[in-house]
Amino acid sequence: MQVSLIEIWHAMGWVVRIVAFVMLGMSIWSLVVAIDKFLLFRRARKQSIRFVEALTQELDKRNLQQALELTRQKEFRHSHVAKIVNHGLQEFLRIMETSAHVASANPHGTATTELEEAFQPHKALERTQHAMERASILEIHEFKRGLSTLATVGATAPFVGLFGTVIGIINAFQAIKTAGAAAIGQVSGGIAEALVMTAFGLLVAIPAVWLYNYFTVRVERIQHEMGNIAADLLDYLVDVQEVMYAKRV
């Protein structure tokens, strides 16, 4: 005898129905998170590609201030690369500006030792690197936000389904005890109900685990991209700094 899903639903007890609704909510929740992350990663990738092209043109002109303004444009607001460059250039230009003020205020070298040490070339690059590292940590946290939901759903959905299975089997055995062995066909819906809940739990968990692994790889890729752009920018700023200090001398 074939048992339809509608018959299984009508045969379910109220506890098992609650479990089914819980797993349905978990499935919808993980789907919403996955769609949000997919759109976020897609926007970040597209905007970062366009930003790198525009940034290269500005850096070729040695126009750091214009490059900084480029990072603040709305069309690049979702670009992780733009945010890293923004923090790096902002810190570097701030230090260079302060260093220039210190040098102009003490033309005969009367500045204090603390000020001189604070604005040495290697100090400026270290602070710039730290600023980009802090920005990178914040960006990674933003990209990872919500992924714990997928991990939780993937880890707990099979157990929630198993709980529904156990309840369904208990109900089936109670029905068998009441109806007797001769009427076992009447309680086949309860047994099917128990098995369906396990299958439902796996159906919810498998896509969630797959999506979690997929987005985790994307986050790692973005982390490498930010590390590469930070290293490239630091190399560029080393050259810029050498030119600036050569002019002062």
Image (cartoon, rainbow, N blue to C red):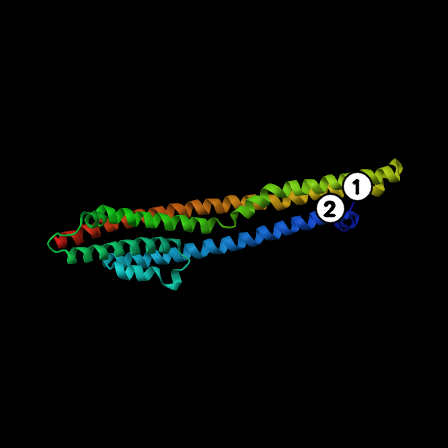
Give the image quarter of residue 171: top right
Q: Are marks 2 and 1 in contact (CB under 8 Å)?
A: yes
Amino acid identity at mark 2: Val
Q: In which quarter of the image is the N terminus?
A: top right
The x and y percentages for residue 234 are: 27, 48
Which residue matches tag 2? 16
Instruction: Measuring from the top left, give residue 90's x and y in whole percent.
Output: 30, 56
Compared across the picture, whether 218 is left or right of 100 comes to: right
Look at the image and tell me whether residue 221 can be seen.
yes
Secondary element at tag 1: helix
Which disc, if any, is residue 209?
none
Residue nearest the observer in this picture, 162 or 128: 128
- Looking at the rendered structure, the kind of residue marked 1 is Asn
Q: Residue at x 35, y 61 (%)?
A: 72
* Sequence order check, earlier mark of 2 and 1: 2
**Quarter-of-image position of residue 66:** bottom left
Residue receiving disc 1 = 171
Say if residue 232 shows up in the picture. no
* Distance of label 2 from label 1 (alpha carbons): 10 Å
Residue at x 76%, y 42% (from the top left corner): 192
Q: Give residue 191's position: percent from left, percent from top.
A: 77, 40
Q: Residue furthest bottom?
A: 74
Residue shown at 85% from the left, 43% from the top: 186
Circle 2 residues within 10 Å: few <14, some 14–19, many ≥20: many
